[in-house]
Amino acid sequence: MNKKIIVVLALLLLISSVYASGFCNGFEKGYITGFKQSSGSSFDPFTPFCPFQPFKDFNDPESDFEHGYIIGYEKGIADGRK
């Protein structure tokens, strides 16, 4: 019974990481751009771990990359001001 639960959890994590790869790539690029813009630094910052992809609202872009880029950009700007 425990082995089945572990296997199911491992598969869910694997599927979610493959599904979110475009989102995470966009998040990383957006975070770096936002951080550089708000801090005035020319060095690439250490990017935080990619968050879980939130559900898209009506006004969010269709592309997972663009959705991640917007979220990463906003977080990068906020962190760059600190």
Image (cartoon, rainbow, N blue to C red):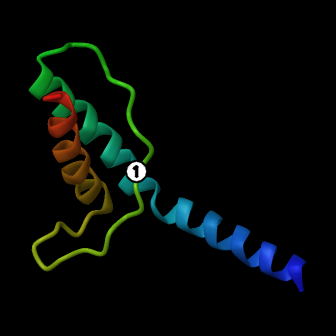
Position of 61 with respect to 14 (left or right) is left
Residue type highlighted by circle 1: Cys
Q: Position of residue 48 (x, y in %)?
A: 40, 39
Q: Position of residue 33 (x, y in %)?
A: 20, 32
Quadrant location of the C terminus?
Answer: top left
Q: Position of residue 4 (x, y in %)?
A: 84, 82
Position of 57 with respect to 2 (left or right) is left
- 13 to 73, vertically: above or below: below
Position of 32 with respect to 4 (left or right) is left
What residue is at 89 percent from the left and 77 percent from the top? 3
Quadrant location of the N terminus?
Answer: bottom right
Tell me if mark 1 has few (under 14), some (14-19) or many (20+) residues whose alpha carbon lies within 10 angstroms of its own: many
Q: Hey, which residue is sitting farthest top in the picture?
A: 42
Position of 79 with respect to 3 (left or right) is left
- Quarter residue 40 falls in: top left
- 60 to 43, vertically: above or below: below
Please count the marks in the image.
Answer: 1
- Quarter residue 34 falls in: top left
What residue is at 24 percent from the left and 59 percent from the top? 67
Q: Position of residue 75 (x, y in %)?
A: 22, 44
Residue occupied by mark 1: 24
Q: Hey, which residue is sitting farthest bottom in the picture?
A: 1
Q: 39 or 63: which is nearer to us?
A: 39
Q: Tag 1's secondary structure?
A: helix
Q: Hey, which residue is sitting farthest front in the picture?
A: 82
What residue is at 28 percent from the left and 14 percent from the top? 43
Q: 66 or 6: which is nearer to us?
A: 6
What residue is at 10 percent from the left and 73 percent from the top? 59
